[in-house]
Amino acid sequence: MSEIGTDITKWPSPKHFCSWLGLCPGTKISGGRILSGRNKPCRNKAALCLRMAASSLYRSQTAYGAYLRKMKSRHGPVLAITSLAHKMARAIYCMLSDKQTFKEMGADYYDNLHKERTLKYLRKRATALGYSLTETQETG
């Protein structure tokens, strides 16, 4: 809070806030080709604290912990930590702008949401290929 302050009106949106923190991916494009997507170099102490907090959530049974584990398996530890820090920064911006408290949903909520998205994708893909999926109950 000492780095950010309580006046959040300096940033018009969460995107501006995350960019100020240096947690947004870069957009180095030349001639229509993407040359680099690295984060811009920034020595912001608030971003450093968010990255440290994000790296400590790997074994946590929270929604953020589940998100970090999924992103770490998909993109590696460095990008996963930066991605979670970006997500936390967006939550901080929303909490300060709306003056609301943080509500933790838990790892089960995130895992169920991921499962629903996967099933929706699989159903859509199966119908595109001319198949239909049926749900069965597993026992045991």
Image (tube, rainbow, N blue to C red):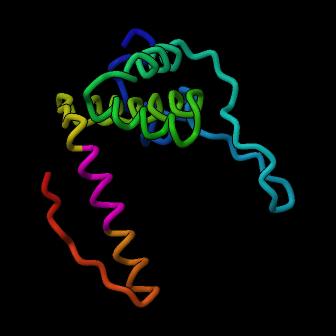
Number of dots carrying numbers: 0
**Residue ranking furthest to the front:** 140
In the rendered image, residue 61, in percent from the top left (x then y), is placed at 25, 27
Q: Is residue 99 left or right of residue 78?
A: left
Residue at 38%, 37% (x, y): give it: 67
Q: Find residue 87 and report its image quarter.
A: top left
Q: Position of residue 9 (x, y in %)?
A: 38, 32
**Occupied quadrant, residue 70:** top left
Picture residue at 34% right of the left edge, 75% below the top: 123
Q: Quadrant of the N terminus?
A: top left
What segment is highlighted magenta in the picture?
Answer: 110-119
Residue located at (34% from left, 29% from top):
65
> In the current view of this chain or complex, which residue is farthest to the top?
2
Taking depth in this image into account, of 66 and 38 the one nearest to the observer is 66
Q: Position of residue 68 (x, y in %)?
A: 42, 32
Compared with residue 76, is residue 133 higher up or lower down, i.e. above or below? Answer: below
Camera-side residue of 127 and 89: 127
Residue lying at 38% horizontally and 85% vertically, measured from the top left? 127
Of helix, strand and loop, which mostly describes the magenta segment? helix
Q: Note whether 32 is above or below 84 in the view shown.
A: below
Q: Nearer the viewer, residue 61 or 135?
A: 135
Residue 46 location (% of width, % of height): 48, 16
Q: In the figure, is residue 22 to the left or right of 125?
A: right
